[in-house]
Image (cartoon, rainbow, N blue to C red):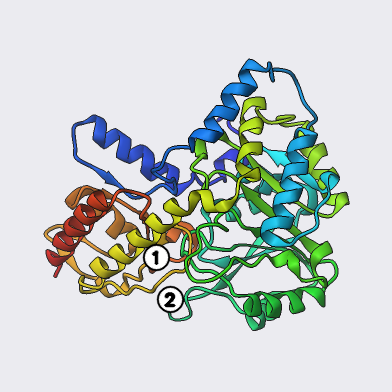
Amino acid sequence: MSAISNRVKDLAESATIAMAAKSRELKSQGKDIISLSLGEPDFFTPDFIKEAAKKAIDDNYSRYMAVAGYEDLRDSISAKFKRDNDLDYSRNQIVVSTGAKQSIINTLLSLVNPGDEVIIPAPYWVTYYEQARMAGGVPVVIETNIENDFKFTAEQLKAHITEKTKLLMFSNPCNPTGSSYSKEELKSIADVVAEHPNLYVISDEIYEHINFAFKHESFAQFDNVYNQTITVNGISKAWAMTGWRIGYIGAPVEIAKACTKIQGQYTSGTGSISQRAAKAAVEADPSVIKHMVDAFKSRRDLMISKFKEIEGIKINEPEGAFYLFPDVTALFGKSNGDYKINNASDLAMYLLDEALVALVTGEAFGDPNCIRISYAASEEELTEAATRIKAAIEKLS
């Protein structure tokens, strides 16, 4: 009999992490792999943030802190919410965690009882689905498509709400599609949520600053759903600080206290030096990272132009984050020798073997018709990757 719990056996491995591991393995074998699988900026953390961390070490920030985070950091996050999002979250409504991923599981464990339904629009970040299940929830998926830029609507939400619905969770801008919701689109969704006072919303806004089309809009800005919304954010993406592991929430006090209670039994307060670095990041004007955002937009435009030249790939123009999510159904049924493409997972493995480019199947994100491509890489790498992909696909017949 296996010693491993059924909980772990039932848990799916993160497809993005699995593909990244496979890429590293092939690289170690001497293969020239271009990895476009992980959602990780290729920039370095800004120097002023690194200096804040060095100073924190010299200032002996080496002891336990409050579980929810240093008070002055939470005050700085409160000011950031007001400055960037016009949201009023006081210190006691904010919980700092070891990455936005922990912020989300804290919230799920605080809200969801076994059997509660959790609505998740697809495509979704791979972790949403599995964390909802870990919390005992029943994921209820809203399907979207490339024709509507993978956005779910108020009408779709209304059709999926039942007496068991407890939570809606989505990202804006979206991982994996890069889609961003306008104020009008969010308002229509908020009006549906407001009709159900026992329905809560996790609004994951980790990509808020990587937005190309219009100003980022926060879901909690609407008064009729403010007390039903948990705003999730962090420093990983916009500030190129994935390894520092800092995420945070703004939430109703009752939920923030529950998340703190959960976290107190898991990790307690997150790393002291990372918290001091995070304080420098959230206090900085977002214009400091404009060069990164401009680079991502240039890379997006480059990749769209390259993929429009590849027959069998349908692509839209995402407004944020750093992903493309092309529809590849036109390639299903094609083959190259013994390699037959039955689905997006087959295509992802084919491109890894034939083109030496690591992508992630859309199946992991709830859409088996697509693949996810991260363009958080240099333009030289992206150009070479697109060239290899085009050559490999042209071999299919």
Circle 1 residue? 325
Q: Nearer the viewer, residue 250 or 56?
A: 56
x 66%, y 74%: residue: 186
Q: Is residue 353 above or below residue 198?
A: above
Residue 60: give x, y in percent of width and height: 68, 16
Circle 2 residue? 146
Q: Earlier in the sequence, mark 1 or mark 2?
A: 2
Q: Which element carries disc 2, helix, strand or loop?
A: helix
Label 2 crowd (10 A; few <14 / some 14-19 / many >=20) = some
Q: Quadrant of residue 173?
A: bottom right
- CB contact under 8 Å: marks 1 and 2: yes
Residue 362: give x, y in percent of width and height: 41, 61
Q: Quadrant of residue 185?
A: bottom right
x 50%, y 65%: residue: 123
Q: Quadrant of the N terminus?
A: top right
x 82%, y 48%: residue: 93
Residue 36 is left or right of residue 269, and the answer is: left
Q: Quadrant of the C terminus?
A: bottom left
Residue 326: give x, y in percent of width and height: 35, 68
Q: Nearer the viewer, residue 262 or 275?
A: 275
Q: Amino acid at mark 1?
A: Phe
